[in-house]
Image: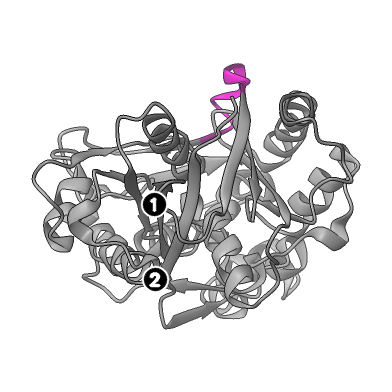
């Protein structure tokens, strides 16, 4: 798909102040490490993640999304009354019903005429929401939209530590599917998108492609113990089980297919983008993706070292931080390479 009229106007983001290091997590897993003779520093060594951020207890996904949304609106200079659509797109949400977007919409004081809904697609939710908003803008249905996401990892990390420590007869094979849960972090991001006719920045979304390999939907799954309990119920928070090795192999295979489609669709080559942003899983994932696609890793910018894997927030917040640090210049071509459990892949091209 290609776009002529869609612009990325302004990002906003929130990073929790509470820092949890990989060393701290391992100290809490000391009994398990001793039983299995695991070396200290293993978690950071395998992932490249030194630390991740977590919200204070009581901060809901809508709270985090609201903070990022306010910042994005302020940075964009757009009148909130002009926003015609709000999409909440994170894995985390306040409850199963109603849409968490309704809480953020009310918090931000957006107009009653705005469309308000959630989109959920694991770590690709934010990119799916960008495409949905872009389609409405390109069709002339709306002139502006805001996409938000607020991921909350605290309960998942805590529950994973508790479950690992409670295993009666642990083995390295038994615990390996739970370890990826210890890399998850919290954060929030928002993006105001506009029609080019009202855009101040003219940062254009050029287009994108998507691919699915849903035969691999079992490689990373989060479950809720009671389907009629909302995510805000701490006793029924999602628990995640991840076959990291198989997910990496299958994800890179799907990414290669999508990258070929993406290059044809936008008439790009591997040399076209000045900056490349991937989903932030860890050092091994980053290296494998760049090698699989034959891309220059010098064009990469990463945040997983200090933020961990922040789900749907990871890729857009990494782009937003790079922009704030002056690492993206006017006119740069940007590749946003998303891969999410399911497995799905979305790749977007932006002319900054």
Q: Residue at x 79, y 30 (%)?
A: 267
Density class for disc 2 (Cα within 10 Å; few <14, some 14-19, many ≥20) is some
349 in relation to 179, above or below: above
Q: Is residue 50 visible?
A: yes
Side of 20 relative to 323 (left or right): left
Q: Give the side of residue 199 with respect to residue 234, left or right.
A: right
- Measured as percent of width and height from the top left, residue 9 is found at 46, 57
Q: Residue at x 24, y 58 (%)?
A: 62
Q: What residue sits 78% from the left and 28% below the top?
A: 253
Q: Is residue 232 visible?
A: no
Label 1 and label 2: CA atoms lie apart by 15 Å
Q: Is residue 21 above or below residue 135?
A: below
Q: Which residue is mark 1?
A: 198
Which quarter of the figure is the C terminus placed in?
Answer: bottom right
| Above or below 325: residue 132 | above
Q: What x and y, as percent, mark residue 231?
A: 24, 48
Instruction: Name the residue that disc number 2 marks.
Output: 75
Q: Is residue 126 left or right of residue 173?
A: left
Secondary structure beneath label 2: helix
Q: Position of residue 70 (x, y in %)?
A: 28, 68
Q: Quadrant of residue 225?
A: top left
């Amino acid at each position: 798909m290609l776009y002529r009229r869609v612009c990325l106007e302004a990002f906003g983001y929130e990073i929790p102040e509470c820092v949890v290091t990989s060393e701290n997590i391992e100290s809490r897993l000391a009994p398990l490490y001793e039983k299995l003779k695991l070396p200290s520093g293993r978690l950071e060594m395998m992932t490249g993640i030194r630390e991740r951020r977590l919200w204070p207890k009581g901060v809901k996904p809508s709270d985090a999304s609201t903070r990022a949304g306010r910042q994005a609106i302020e940075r964009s200079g757009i009148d909130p009354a002009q926003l015609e659509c709000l999409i909440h797109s994170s894995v985390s949400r306040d409850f199963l019903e109603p849409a968490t977007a309704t809480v953020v919409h009310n918090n931000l004081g957006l107009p009653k005429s705005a469309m308000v809904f959630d989109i959920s697609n694991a770590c690709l939710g934010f990119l799916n929401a960008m495409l949905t908003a872009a389609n409405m803008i390109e069709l002339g249905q709306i002139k502006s939209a805001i996409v938000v996401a607020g991921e909350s990892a605290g309960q998942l990390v805590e529950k994973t530590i508790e479950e690992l420590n409670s295993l009666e007869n642990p083995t390295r094979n038994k615990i390996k599917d739970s370890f990826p849960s210890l890399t998850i972090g919290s954060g929030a991001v928002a993006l105001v998108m506009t029609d080019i006719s009202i855009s101040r920045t003219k940062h254009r979304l050029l287009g994108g492609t998507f691919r699915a390999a849903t035969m691999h939907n079992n490689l990373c799954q989060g479950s809720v113990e009671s389907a009629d309990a909302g995510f805000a119920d701490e006793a029924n928070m999602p628990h995640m089980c991840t076959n990291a090795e198989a997910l990496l192999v299958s994800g890179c295979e799907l990414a290669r297919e999508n990258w070929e489609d993406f290059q044809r669709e936008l008439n790009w080559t591997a040399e076209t983008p000045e900056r490349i942003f991937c989903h932030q899983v860890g050092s091994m994932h980053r290296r494998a993706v760049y090698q699989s696609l034959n891309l220059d890793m010098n064009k990469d910018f990463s945040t997983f070292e200090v933020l961990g894997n922040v789900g749907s927030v990871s890729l857009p917040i990494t782009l937003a931080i790079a922009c704030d640090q002056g690492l993206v210049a006017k006119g740069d071509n940007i590749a946003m390479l998303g891969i999410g459990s399911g497995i799905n892949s979305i790749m977007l091209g932006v002319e900054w």
